[in-house]
Image (cartoon, rainbow, N blue to C red):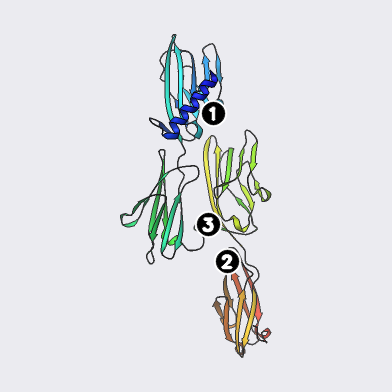
Amino acid sequence: MARKDYIQGILLSFILFCVRCVDCENVATGTNYTLKSAITGPIELGDWKHNGNLVVEWDVKSAPVWYRLKDRAQLNTDNGDLTVWLNKEDSGIFMAEFQVQGVLQNFERTIKVIDPVTKPKVTCEQNDLDITLKCSVDDPVQALFTWSGPDGFSHVGDSVQITRKQNDDSIYYCSAKNEESVMSAEFKLKDCISEGCVDCENVATGTNYTLKSAITGPIELGDWRYNGNLVVEWDIKTGFLEWYRFQDRAQLNLANGDLSVVLEKNDSGVFKAQFQVNRVLQYFERTIKVIDPVTKPEVTCKQNDQNIKLTCSLKPPVKAEFKWTGPNGFSHVGNSVQFLGNENADSFYYCTAKNEVSEESAEFNLKNCEDPVS
């Protein structure tokens, strides 16, 4: 009988949720949800099933016997109400049978457990004046995306293409919506640049960087993801801890969820975490751009008669902005500079290379530039 109930439950769940959920009640993941049976009269015995599988059964003469959900459910034996802290996999049919004064009464409720949408993230790609905006939410959440913007602009879909006008400072809004919730985010076109990262934190390659989640309360379970791929997940109650990447150069603080990583150049991207605290999910997200710090620049010279050209360079692939300083308030921006050598034949010129994470300088005395350099 138990195996028959199990198979019936599987088939029922598959038919209902693989096609569509009709006459469902939509409930957010993590909700403390009570199935109110509205049974009248003293219950002599009863049971609850989920998708055909026994959850709990009891009679007035003995304590309830639990088969599943015990660690996150409560039963009121007086009125038959069942309260469950819902997980995503709890979608389906809850059925109850109660005996009241020798007569059986039945109750049924179909629910669909839905992950509420997180705040959407808008990213952009630019090709000259053509911009593609893309809106996304955390996996595995599914949502319908709509866009709005200036002059009554409206669009449905997760991405939209826009031709940017000169000095266009317009703001576009993306809304992500499902049956349970709706969240919106805005994006300014001026923040879309051909290279770089908007709302990133720039970090030097080789930094032992800590992603501080600032989660409050004891973490029961959690996971970290990098660009959508699992990094580590854990469960305090069961002692489960598994690394999927970064283990050889990362540390995890189980108490507060902080993740420390010795960063490599290819670690640029989005780090996301979700934590369960007091059975409620909390989220954290940080986008970082890992940048090679500048090395000490090298200054070379090329002389043609009295004309001298100084060039400042770094070892590839490091990129930087260059600035020169010298005597009498001399200042120049760029990796090379030209002047007449006989004007300041014994003078020092300084080249500073700078990027988002560091800067280095080098000096050069013009008297050392004697022979032509090809």
Looking at the picture, which amino acid does disc 3 mark?
Cys
Classify 131 as above or below 83: below
Task: Write down the residue under mark 1.
Answer: 72
Whole-angstrom CA distance, mark 1 to mark 3, is: 39 Å
Q: Residues within 10 Å of mark 3 (few under 14, many from 20)?
A: some
Return the x and y of residue 299 as percentages of the image width and height. 64, 77
Q: Are marks 1 and 3 in contact (CB under 8 Å)?
A: no
Task: Write down the residue under mark 2.
Answer: 355
Query: Mark 2 falls on what kind of element?
Result: loop
Classify 191 as above or below 121: below
At x 47%, y 46%, the residue is: 137
Please tell me in which quadrant of the rendered image residue 365 appears.
bottom right
Q: Earlier in the sequence, mark 3 or mark 2?
A: 3
Task: Write down the residue under mark 3.
Answer: 200
Q: Is residue 218 visible?
A: no
Q: Earlier in the sequence, mark 1 or mark 3?
A: 1
Q: Earlier in the sequence, mark 2 or mark 1?
A: 1
Looking at the picture, which amino acid does disc 2 mark?
Asn
At x 40%, y 31%, the residue is: 25
Return the x and y of residue 171 as percentages of the image width and height. 38, 57
Query: Mark 3 falls on what kind of element?
Result: loop
**Nearer to the camera, 13 or 28:** 13
Return the x and y of residue 160 as percentages of the image width and height. 40, 54
Whole-angstrom CA distance, mark 3 to mark 2, is: 15 Å
Query: Mark 1 falls on what kind of element?
Result: helix
Identify the image quadrant of the C terminus: bottom right
